Image (spheres, rainbow, N blue to C red):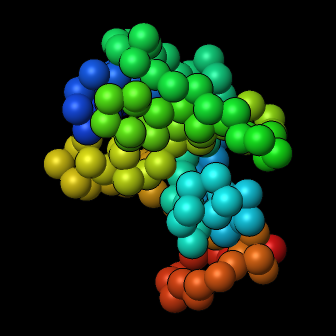
Amino acid sequence: MTDYHVTCDCGAVGMSLTGEPRVRGHCHCQACRTLLNTPYHSVNAWMPEQVRITSGEADLIDFQHPYLKMRKIYCGKCGEVMFNTNAMDWRVVSQHLMAKNNDGILPDELKSLSHFHYGGRVIDVVDDLPKKE
Ligand SMILES: [Zn+2]
Ligand SMILES: [Zn+2]
């Protein structure tokens, strides 16, 4: 079973991820845009039991968005988002965080397999991945 370990920018918060993510993709939904101020969100989504905070729990801020059924969990010292949750309470982890913790390279087995909510996009992406509405 694969284990990944990542830390936030300042190193206070550590997090481990076990196994394979449930979803690997680029999400173009409005909720991701609203929560994270990004045109789309490149993610790996994990089940709650696959994700464990290994250090810095006291520094974590668990922010419930005022109207989305989403939370943003970030380091209170450096502001790095460790994950956000979706309506199913999955742990949605940015692929950028995974790459940053691996010498800037996203492991092949974490790369996106598709785009989703592509119909709601605000930016076109030209690649060979399937585009799902
Ligand atoms: Zn930090
Ligand atoms: Zn989304």
| Residue 26 visible at all | no
Q: Residue at left 35%, top 14%?
A: 56
Q: In this rendering, would 45 be left or right of 105?
A: right
- Quadrant, the C terminus: bottom right
From the viewer's perspective, is residue 2 above or below residue 55?
below
Q: Residue at x 26, y 48 (%)?
A: 100
Snapshot quadrant of residue 116? bottom right
| Residue 90, position as x, y percentages in the image | 69, 34
Residue located farthest toward the left when viewing the structure as drawn: 103
Q: Is residue 132 left or right of residue 7?
A: right
Q: Please determine whether, in this image, residue 65 is positioned above or below residue 63.
A: below
* Relative to 103, residue 14 above or below: above
Instruction: Out of 122 and 42, give the one closest to the viewer.
Output: 122
User: Could you tell me which quadrant the N terminus lies in?
Assistant: top left
Q: Quadrant of residue 4?
A: top left
In this orientation, which residue lies closer to the viewer: 6 or 3? 6
> Picture coordinates of residue 50 (x, y %)?
56, 22
